[in-house]
Amino acid sequence: MAERSEWILGRTEATARGGMVAAKTRLAAEAGAEVLRAGGNAVDAAVATAVAAGVVEPWMSGIGGGGFLVAHVPDRDEAVVVEFPMVAPAAATPEMFPLAGTGTDAALFGWPAVVAGANVIGHRAVAVPGTVAGLALALERYGTITFVDALAPAIRLADEGVPVTWHTTLTIARDLAALTRFPATAAVFCDAQGRPPVTIDQTRPALLRQGDLAATLRTLAAEGPRAFYEGPLARAIVAHLVEHGAPFTEADFAGYEPTVVPALEATYQGHRLVTVGNGSGGTTLVESLHLLEAAGVGGLGHNTPEALHLMVQAFRQAFADRFAYLADPNFVDVPIAALTAADYARERAAAFRHDALGPIRAGDPARLGVRHGLAASMPEYVGQPSQALSGSTTHLSVIDRNGAAVSLTQTLLSGWGSRVVVPGTGVLLNNGMMWFDPEPGRPNSVAGGKRPLSNMAPAILTRDGRTVASFGASGGRRIINALAQVTVNLVDHELGMQPAISEPRIDASTPELLSSVRLPQATRDTLAALGHRVAPRDEGQFLGDFASPVGVLRGDDGTLRGGADPFYYPTTVVGVEGTS
């Protein structure tokens, strides 16, 4: 018998056989589903969804950002990654971000604070965007539709306008002070009085129209993706950045190239997980899964105190290694192979304590083959502990009728990126420079032409060469712990995609252990008694305390089942029964 009433949130699971798209907004998912209905493959649908997402959820992503696409083709059991991350301009140096001397940034990492927050908001926070080039390359290599066709839904949405929901209004309102610092940004996302648009009557919604962005997308459709990097559009973007003190040249844009590389792989309980590597969240996800398997977490019951206690130690070990060693391997010696090796995980997991939370430190550099001697970022997790952090990352997952899968995560980095819209273009630019540690002498310190450390970790799960699931999340550094737990739920506990996402989670990416209030009080008390700094969080407050996953699960008979974060209002899964 309950003494008080509770507001219960949940989502139904989508089911289909002809293809499925899971995305963070309905209109973006519908754009991809239409491509599947017309006979397109998973890459076609993913690219159309991704471009549309930048229009309908501009605070999350867009053509001014970057990301990663993981694809699995079951006929060849081939897994590849299209990398299109943001890159520092060639003239970038640590000196462009002088340290404030006290405090940490108010954004996703908790780095030491920079004078005037210049690495978080404004023109100097911008890195070279990769989204246009990356999506075009994915379509060229693995798609069947034209770039023009892939852009068409986004152009229509930008022209006709996107209905404003309470979520849109709230998202603009919570960052209104920063958005209105830039007139071109306020002109797009605020009303004539500089306020967030509001829908009063759902039969006559306010519309967020983006005419300049539609024109820019038409230019890309007519002239091709290189028009974003060379020519009048690129010159306009660079000129605006230079005018406001950012160290860009036209060569920074003209020289940008996405890449196609093999996926990073992890073996977990007879399954293969494929994701992104190098200085990304995927590398830490792979290390986390190997540690969880070595610790035997899957056999200790679902969300039991014993399982969660070892899970936290695995996550803290992986993050200690992340902050100590991960960066762009083209600039610094990064021990990717050593960190993601199963034997290293067994060594570290053997030291995990069952009776208490013991000390956890980054692996020995000599053991990992690291010779540079650079200091670790945020030793012992010094930094932002537990406040809710709004990211601007979005994720989408697609599995088509043939079982081919795409997992794509793209971002502007923090909410609304740099908050800078280039006048006359509608392009909202990223704040990718915030991903760098602003302190010099660290593996992930600022350098010209360098890729910053990213949290993105799009993932695909396979078994015996067959696609099992495509999933990923938004949520900054909390993405990694979330996806590890979704994997455990799918593989060890054989949950469907929706329950695997909906189950209560923990997050150990900050000094405190965030714990869903939906976990039993006795479980949280046990964790506290074991030495964890348990910080209860209520997802129903909609403050983004945990990452926000979506995904698609494929059964042995080809049936597709989609799941989405029940605490993120716009997210939607759309299934397709047949193709034309």
Image (cartoon, rainbow, N blue to C red):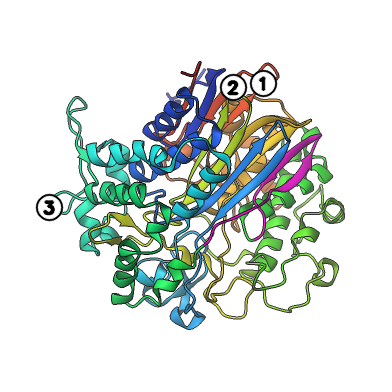
Look at mark 1 in the image and give the residue it sits on.
Answer: 555
Q: Is residue 481 shown left or right of residue 180?
A: right
Residue 493 image-quadrant placement: top right
Q: Dot 1, how many residues are within 10 Å of its Cα: few (below 14), some (14-19), or many (20+)?
A: some
Question: What amino acid type should be assigned to the residue bearing mark 3?
Answer: Gln
Q: Is residue 358 shown left or right of residue 207?
A: right
Q: Is residue 407 above or below residue 444?
A: above
Residue 377 position, x and y percent, is 62, 70
Residue 142 position, x and y percent, is 58, 40
Q: Residue at x 43, y 33 (%)?
A: 571
Q: Nearer the viewer, residue 190 or 352?
A: 190
Q: Residue at x 73, y 79 (%)?
A: 373
Q: Dot 3, how many residues are within 10 Å of its Cα: few (below 14), some (14-19), or many (20+)?
A: few
Q: Nearer the viewer, residue 556 or 346?
A: 556
Question: What amino acid type should be assigned to the residue bearing mark 2?
Answer: Leu
Asked if residue 214 is among those painted magenta in the image, a careful observer would answer: no
Whether residue 475 appears in this view of the structure is no
Residue lying at the far bottom in this picture: please name it: 95
Q: Is residue 121 shown left or right of residue 40?
A: left
What residue range appears in magenta? 257-278
Assign a secondary structure to mark 3: loop
Look at mark 2 in the image and give the residue it sits on.
Answer: 560
Label 1 or label 2, whichever comes before in sequence order: 1
Mark 1–mark 2 contact, CB under 8 Å? yes
What separation in Å lies between label 3 and label 1 (alpha carbons)?
52 Å
Assign a secondary structure to mark 1: loop
Look at mark 3 in the image and give the residue it sits on.
Answer: 193
